[in-house]
Image: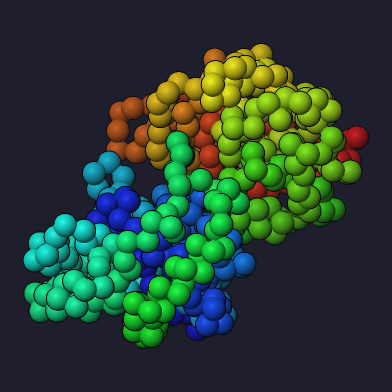
Amino acid sequence: MSAPRLLLCASASGGGKTTVTCAVLQALVNRERNPVAFKCGPDYIDPMFHSEIIGAKSRNLDLFFLGEDKTRYLLEQNSAGSGLALIEGVMGYYDGIAMSHEASAYHLARVTETPAVLVLDGRGSALTLAAAVHGMQTFRPDSGIRGVILNRVSPMLYPRLKACIEAETGLTVYGYLPNLPDCALESRHLGLVTASEVAGLKEKLRKLAAQAEQSLDLDGLLALAASAPALNPKPVDLPEPVEGQPVIAVARDKAFCFYYADGLELLEQMGARLVEFSPLEDEDLPQGACGLYLGGGYPELFARALADNAPMRRAVHAAVTGGMPTVAECGGFLYLQDTLADGEGKAWPMAGVFPAAARNTGRLGRFGYVTLTAQTDGLLCRAGEAFPAHEFHYWDSTAPGTDFRAQKPQSDRGWDCAFHTPTLYAGFPHFHFWARPELARHFVAAARRHNQTT
């Protein structure tokens, strides 16, 4: 039986989706309702906040990466046994690819038949709030919007706003959060700072949960979530796992923390044993490692510390150049450069796999969803094969690679990127192993072969 589920959405970024999601999650944890969190889209950081809160899993649901069937399947699998699956939307509710609703929060709500609750910033408006709700509700006849939560409104004004919106739209207003400056979540160039960096996060979450209990109709939200129909997803056929449990070393610390949890679990399903290590703190790769996964993150913020750890830089250089199968995405790719500039522009030595320099361009470079088509046979796939990916970075390299062709969806824009050899994928595009599970199996199989020859 499918878990009760809700999707929290907004009319635009910055409307308070993450704050309200955190408040509801923490309140439900306090009630021992065992919630599971999901994030619509490719964002890595919001799920880290969810995990920090619930102490359990938080996952991404991305229709561009996964398609409809795998999205429904992973939602069902990851929410099994939970008291509530709470999905946080992305951007504005209808905002998808290339001015369409494709891969939007609305698309996700429709595909998964999840009731949506609109989080609306109530500052500086009165009757116009009802007009905004009505417009969002009726823009599509199957909008799925079933309720409203008001954010940043005063307790004194809320009853009148609630009555007005409900009378004009027929939707239920499930409460409000007042302006809570002490609970603000800071941002940086890739979005919110990571959960581990937020000063006093636990205290902020305690305050948010207490406020949610006071001014949100949590019982009403749970009842709405329970109205969602069963998902009944189609089963997903996966490749046969690799034997031998080859060890893949996964870089995991403050500098490297951007991973899709479902993707890591898929590597394990394909036969890998994942062992985490820290390029900041450790001096060598884990014992027995025969594969290397360098995910994204913020290595530029820790460039000096990474440079100071010369033994690890040498170990990674020796592993990659020695043929250890390696996946290095964005931040991991920056670590493989000859030098990496920090936020002040000072260049620091890195692992030196590529004779190239990485520096801050001061703006987003190649940004958004792309389809990668391999120009050469390599670790992940053969020439001509394609899979979805995503780029989002301010730092760039003097040698970004040319072994894949990246093509923007519904656009003529494209570019060459990344390196692809029989033992290496390294480039700025991030990808999700569940998009094409064969990629995970190819990586694990290569690690096993490397283990047998060393």
Q: 312 or 212, which lies in front?
A: 212
User: Disc count in the image?
Assistant: 0
Where residue 369 appears, as percent x and y from the top left, is: 41, 40
Q: How is the image coloured?
A: rainbow
Left or right of 42, for residue 335: right
Q: Is residue 247 above or below residue 202?
A: above
Residue at 26% across, 73% down: 155
Q: Is residue 230 above or below residue 409?
A: below
The quarter holding residue 7 reads bottom left
Q: 334 or 418, which lies in front?
A: 334
Visible in this render: residue 183?
Answer: yes
Q: 198 or 230, which lies in front?
A: 198
Q: Is residue 434 above or below residue 376?
A: below
The quarter holding residue 141 reads bottom left
Left or right of 212, for residue 288: right
Visible in this render: residue 135?
Answer: no
The quarter holding residue 366 reads top left
Q: 268 or 180, which lies in front?
A: 180
Residue at 58% across, 20% down: 341
Where residue 74 appears, as percent x and y from the top left, is: 52, 65
Residue at 45% across, 75% down: 210
Where residue 66 appears, as percent x and y from the top left, is: 47, 54
Q: Quadrant of the C terminus?
A: top right
Residue at 54% across, 18% down: 345
